[in-house]
Image (cartoon, rainbow, N blue to C red):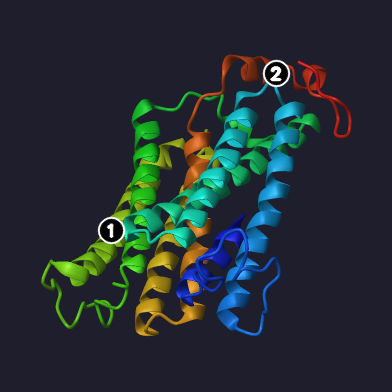
Amino acid sequence: MALVNLVGFLDTQTNSALGCGPDWPLCNGQLIPNLNNEHVLIEFGHRMIVGGFALIATIFMIWAWIRYRDWVEAKVFAIIGIGFIIVQSALGALAVLFVNPPAILALHLGFGFLAMVGVALLAAFLWQMDRLADGQQAGLQYRSLVLPKGLVWRIWIVWVYTYLAIYLGSYVAFRSAGEACTGWPLCNGQVIPPLYGNIGLDFAHRVAAIILAILVIELLWQLRKQKSTRPDLYRGAGWLVIIVFLQILTGANLALSHLGTGPYLLHVGNLMLLFTLISYLAVQSLHPVPKAQRWMAEPQSNIAPKGEPRHP
C-alpha cells in the first residue's frame, strides 16, 4: 500500500493524473493504451498498481478477519483497510471523470494514508500474534499494562494533529502553492511573510511541521517515566522524533530543489513512515479488549503454534 501511495504521489507530481484522459476505467478509450507517452505510462501504471494491490490487500484482510475472528483488532484494522481502499478508489475515479477542487483531491491522498495504515497495523498485529504463539514477548502484551489517561490523550492528539498536517500538505500541493515560499528556512526572505493566499498556505504548512516537532518532543519527555514499563512506547516515541526531524529536512530539501521529483518522493515516503509509526503508537496506547486479555493470560493453551488453527 505504501507503493500505491508513492506511485499516486508520482502521478500528481508529474501532472499525469489525466494521462488517460477523462476516461475510467478505460484509458484513452482503450483497455490497454499506447504507452509511448510518459504521462499515459505513469497514470496507467498507477491504475494497474492500485487495482492489483487493492485486490491482494483485500484478500489478505478477509483471510485475517476469518482466521482471527475472535480478535477485535483484526476486524477493525481490516475494516479500516478495505473501507478506505474503496473510498480512495472511488475518489480517484471521480477525480478523473470530474473536475474536483483541491480540498477533495487532498482527501483522496489522506484516505490513501488511512488505507495504508489499516493494512500496516493488521500486519503488525499478526506479527505480534505469531510471537505470542511462540511464547515470545510481543507488543500486544504491553497493552495490558495500565497507562495514565493523560498519556493516552497526548498520543491520540499527536495522531490527529499529524493527520491534519498531512491534509494541509496535500492541500498545499494540489493548490500548486508548494513554491509560494521560496528559500528555506525563511519564506521569501522573511521570518513571517504576508499571511494570505498561497504564501500564507505554504507558510502555514511550515509552521505546522514545527508544531509537530514540538509535540513529539513533548510526548517523548512525558513517556520517559514509562521507559521501563512501556519500552514499546518510549522507543517508538524516540524514533518518531527522529523521523519528524527527517521530515523537516526532506521538506527543506524539497523547497531548495524547487519541488524536484526525487526530493518530493523522498519527502512523502518519509511521511508515510511517520504516519504509520504514530498510528502504531496510538494503537499501543489502548487497553486490549477483555477477550484479548484472557487469551494473553494463557497464551500456550489458547494460541496454537504457527501453521495450526487457533481456537477461542
Q: Label 2, label 1: how many angstroms apart (C-alpha)?
A: 42 Å
Identify which residue is drawn at 33% across, 61% down. 102
Which quadrant would residue 121 be assigned to in this image?
A: top right
For discs 2 and 1, the disc positioned in front in the rendered view:
1
Mark 1 — residue? 208
Q: Residue furthest right?
A: 308
Nearer to me, 144 or 253: 253
Q: Secondary structure at mark 1?
A: helix
The residue that mark 2 highlights is 295
Q: Could you tell me residue 64's position as x and y percent?
A: 72, 34
SS at badge 2: helix
Query: How packed is label 1: few (under 14 Cα within 10 Å), some, or many (20 or more)?
Result: some
Q: Residue type at mark 2?
A: Trp
One can see residue 266 in this view: no
The residue positioned 61% from the left and 68% from the top of the image is 27
Image quadrant in which you'd find residue 225: top left
Q: Residue furthest left?
A: 194
In the image, which disc is placed on residue 60? none
Q: Position of residue 126 (x, y in %)?
A: 71, 37
Q: Position of residue 89 (x, y in %)?
A: 55, 51
Question: x%, y% of residue 58?
Answer: 68, 42
Among the two numbered marks 2 and 1 on one chain, the one whose residue lies closer to the N terminus: 1
The answer to whether residue 269 shows anywhere in this view is yes
Picture quadrant of residue 49:
bottom right
